[in-house]
Amino acid sequence: MNKNSPPPPAPLKTERVSLRRRPDRGQYSLEAVTAILDQTFLCHLGFVAAGQPFVIPTSFGLEGGKIYVHGSSASRMLRELSQGIPMCFTAMILDGLVLARSAFNHSMNYRSVVVLGKAFPVEGAEKLKALEIMSEHMVPGRWAETRLPNSTEMMATSVLSIDIAEASTKIRSGPPLDDDEDMDHQCWAGVLPVQAFSGLPIPDPRSKGSPPAPSYLGSVRGLTTPTDIEPK
Ligand SMILES: Cc1cc2nc3c(=O)[nH]c(=O)nc-3n(C[C@H](O)[C@H](O)[C@H](O)COP(=O)(O)OP(=O)(O)OC[C@H]3O[C@@H](n4cnc5c(N)ncnc54)[C@H](O)[C@@H]3O)c2cc1C
């Protein structure tokens, strides 16, 4: 390769996932996507049904370059997506509100992911494994304690997988970017950090006995938890 030739395209980058605005904030590697998706379990899935675009919030799991989503077999989203129609997955973590001196330069600090592609139904033994991956992605340690789904519950549940093959990430961090001529404008400017917290666990009033809250509640993905997780 000539020393002046551009680097080879990153594997996940295509024309349609290329950022136009602030392309310097984008990355297109599986590592970059995974680093963000490892810190959240919430996403939105976009698809078009009967000519109408829908964007539906849901949760996901992640393993080996695949995203897993699940839901009721009767769900329109699951039924439509399992037909192999084009879809868009997006997830976002808000890190702060960026308060600039000018209204125009207000912004947010965030880490976000967009994946384009199709979703494929997951069946057989892989389906139960995918449900475990989703459960463990949200609350690591939970799956081993729960009653596993029976055949009726498995029938009532659809699981889809999405390959992370065409994707972008975008990250904004740091202080406001005010223009030089606004720097004498007197108002507070800076970043208000934002974090997601969980509260203290509230035991189910129908619990038999008083089992202690499990320690894994302190490692729910993307949530900062109180150190004291003893049940009230
Ligand atoms: C919390 C939050 C708040 C935001 N607020 C604003 C706002 O108020 N106004 C505004 O204009 N923008 C805002 N953005 C940025 C916005 O998400 C888009 O990045 C921006 O509109 C991109 O425009 P574009 O024309 O460059 O890309 P588009 O042409 O719209 O997109 C091209 C491709 O770039 C990729 N892409 C675009 N945006 C993102 C992203 N955020 N993350 C990962 N991949 C992306 C996708 O693969 C997409 O297919 C916000 C983002 C976040 C996460």
Image (cartoon, grey):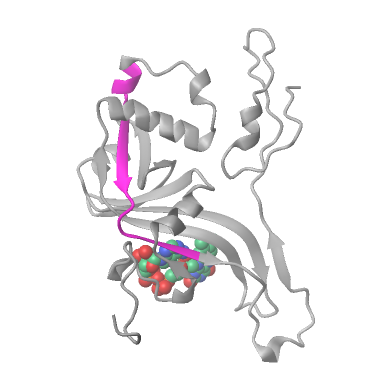
**Residue drawn at (41%, 54%), measured in percent from left and top?**
90
Query: For the magenta stretch, what is the residue range?
Result: 152-170
> Looking at the picture, how far across and down is residue 23, in whole percent?
44, 75
Q: Quadrant of the C terminus?
A: top right
Q: Is residue 83 left or right of residue 103?
A: left
**Magenta residue check for 162:** yes
**Residue drawn at (45%, 52%), measured in percent from left and top?**
34
**Residue drawn at (66%, 80%), measured in percent from left and top?**
102
Q: Is residue 69 visible to the viewer in this orientation of the structure?
A: yes
Foreground pick, 8 / 3: 3
User: Residue 179's quadrant in the figure?
Assistant: bottom right
Q: What residue occupies the far top of the structure in this picture? A: 208
Foreground pick, 8 / 32: 8
Q: Is residue 3 above or below residue 12?
A: below
> Looking at the picture, how far across and down is residue 193, in whole percent?
69, 59
Q: What residue occupies the far left of the structure in this picture? A: 83
Q: Is residue 197 left or right of residue 159?
A: right
Q: Is residue 59 above or below residue 140?
A: below
> Looking at the picture, how far across and down is residue 4, in whole percent?
34, 87
Q: Is residue 74 above or below residue 45?
A: above
Ligand 1: image quarter: bottom left
> Looking at the picture, how far across and down is residue 158, in whole percent?
30, 31
User: Residue 212's quadrant in the figure?
Assistant: top right
**Magenta residue check for 21:** no
**Residue drawn at (54%, 33%), measured in percent from left and top?**
139
